[in-house]
Amino acid sequence: MIAGFENSDTMTAAARLLLEIRQAGITDKRVLHAMESIPRDRFIPRAFRERAHDNVALPIGRQQTISQPALVALMTQALEVGDRMKVLEIGTGSGYQAAILAKLCRRLYTVERHPPLLKDAEAIFKTLRLTNITSLLRDGTMGWQEQAPFDRIMMTCAALDIPKQLIDQLTIGGIMVLPVGLEDHDQRLIKLVRTHDGAETEDLGGVRFVPLLHGVETP
Ligand code: SAH
């Protein structure tokens, strides 16, 4: 192979992906910049790495998936993350969504129930010098009470209902974005804003995520 060719191919694929993300309605410049600056291929197992710049979900092991980039961008844009904010993510998985959020906020907290997934994600955070991420092996159903309240919460696995404990860990005016529903049924992406006396929700459309499971796996 001629030196440099591989690189320019990757550049083209990355530029094409960014265009697709824009075409999917992502206009927030900070979100687009974060998507541009985090190398998705680093979060993908070697076997699928050549598809890292395709706008598709890919397997990351343990029957889990890294979401489609356009959906990552859409959920990130919907979360309206500011640079002074404290953000919680439930479901670290590959760590890709966490890395994108970390680019946009002051501190990103993320929890995962699979030890090997968490360990791999933490190694990538270190390599990419994403020092504002705090991660933990934990059942995220209960959120992260010790660190609450959060300005923003994102769940990247689907619950049957919106977990009440998570709403309680949001600041007033805080936003949560999460998929709700059964894996093989009509799952909806919900944006929730915590108000003084409850929460307001908005349906952002149909999605398909792996389910929120209880407890943590043993290593
Ligand atoms: N944000 C991830 C998406 C991973 S898929 C990424 O960018 O790659 C969803 C993840 O949620 C899986 O890794 C799964 O193990 C995790 N998960 C499911 N239930 C959980 C729970 N109760 N607590 C923490 N993580 C959970």
Image (cartoon, grey):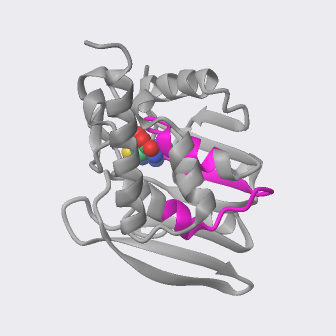
Give the quarter of the image for residue 188. bottom left
Looking at the image, how many numbered discs can be counted on the residues? 0
Residue at the image position 45 percent from the left and 40 percent from the top: 215
Would residue 193 be visible to someone looking at this image?
yes
Give the quarter of the image for residue 49. top left
Quarter of the image where ligand 1 sits = top left
Would residue 158 be visible to someone looking at this image?
no
Q: Is residue 26 left or right of residue 134?
A: left
x and y percentages locating residue 17 in the rendered image: 36, 50
x and y percentages locating residue 180 in the rendered image: 38, 68
Q: Is residue 33 above or below residue 44?
A: below
Residue at the image position 65 percent from the left and 46 percent from the top: 103
Q: Is residue 193 left or right of residue 11?
A: right
Is residue 81 located in the magenta-colored stretch of the structure?
yes
Along the line of sight, the residue nearer the viewer: 113 or 44: 44
Give the quarter of the image for residue 63. top left
x and y percentages locating residue 37 in the rendered image: 56, 41
Residue stretch rendered in magenta on the structure: 75-102
Along the line of sight, the residue nearer the viewer: 203 or 199: 203
Residue at the extreme left of the image, as rendered:
184
Residue at the image position 40 percent from the left and 47 percent from the top: 15
Residue at the image position 58 percent from the left and 49 percent from the top: 34
Q: Is residue 135 left or right of residue 12?
A: right
Q: Is residue 140 above or below residue 45?
A: below
x and y percentages locating residue 66 in the rendered image: 36, 43
